[in-house]
Image: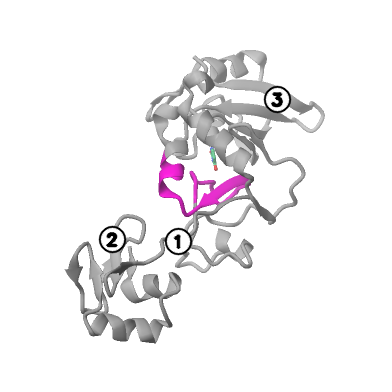
Amino acid sequence: MERLQKILAAAGVASRRKCEELIASGAVEVNGKVVRELGTKADPATDEITVKGKRIASEKKIYLMMNKPKGVITSASDPKGRKIVSDFLPGIKERVYPVGRLDYDTEGLLLLTNDGEFANLLTHPSHHVPKTYLATVKGVPHGSALERLQKGIKLEDGMTAPAEADYHDVDVDAGVATISITIYEGRNRQVRRMFDAIGHPVARLKRIKFGHLGLENMQRGKFRHLTLSEIKELRDAALSHNSHKK
Ligand code: URA
């Protein structure tokens, strides 16, 4: 929800001040009702907003991927003044939000869009879109521990769905291992909690794939627009239940 004058200005109707005048004059309707109060909030994605009877242009839909650095939060603002993802999106005027979150300490592939339907589609738990992470963990887990992750492991909020887990890099001398793990759910801090459950806490976590989309060699802190075929591929991954490994 956003203040009406801000929505109108963002849609290119006029300057913020001029939009306030339009509202006060009774020229603006929300869902068929005249709104004269300046503080009124509306949702440009779902409310029908008209100015002098003409519906305002809805915001152009944009789809981005970024390589989120660690130490950045995925919220729109932070009362503690920490860095937020929009700090890394110079030139993007649309208000985008993340498709599923990444923890403050997690880096890697983050999708961002202003298309709420697309975001819901990809994050809906029944759609099982695979997400792949590289988790650098303390100690070197035994094969049997990885098998527990693969089969499903008990967390406080229930069993996890089957996952894929494999060694990516092992440094026996340093006592650390990097495990590639693909999960089909998106519970809060899920990967960290799964490794906690096998006694190998995560020291570093990076998402390298979302559906078929890979981070490739995108530099940390950079972003780009998705191509039409990438957007379609992500939609298809959510809609086809073939992506669901059981
Ligand atoms: N799992 C986690 O533990 N953290 C993330 O940011 C994403 C998945």
**Which structural element holds mark 1?**
loop
- Which residue appears at 62% of the width and 67% of the height? 91
**Residue that mark 1 sits on:** 59
Mark 3 vs 1, N-terminal side: 1
Three-letter amino acid code at the position of disc 1: Glu
Does the residue tagged 1 have its C-beta within 8 Å of any atom of ligand 1? Answer: no
Question: CA gap, disc 3 to disc 2?
Answer: 56 Å
**Which structural element holds mark 2?**
loop
Mark 1 vs 2, N-terminal side: 2
Residue lying farthest to the front in this orientation: 53
Q: Quadrant of the N terminus?
A: bottom left
Q: Quadrant of ligand 1?
A: top right
Question: CA gap, disc 1 to disc 2?
Answer: 13 Å
Q: Nearer the viewer, residue 118 or 194?
A: 118
Seen in the picture, residue 236 relative to 166 is either above or below; the reply is below
- The percent coordinates of residue 231 (x first, y second) are 57, 41
**Residue that mark 2 sits on:** 48
Does the residue tagged 3 have its C-beta within 8 Å of any atom of ligand 1? Answer: no
- Disc number placed over residue 140 in the picture, else none: 3
- The percent coordinates of residue 26 (x first, y second) are 21, 80
Query: Is label 1 in contact with label 2 (beta carbons under 8 Å)?
Result: no
Few, some or many residues within 10 Å of mark 3 (<14, 14–19, 20+): many
Q: Nearer the viewer, residue 38 or 175?
A: 38
Three-letter amino acid code at the position of disc 3: Val
Query: Is label 3 in contact with label 2 (beta carbons under 8 Å)?
Result: no
- Which residue appears at 20% of the width and 74% of the height? 35
Which of the two discs, 3 and 2, sits closer to the camera? Answer: 2
Q: Provide the residue span drawn in magenta.
A: 98-120
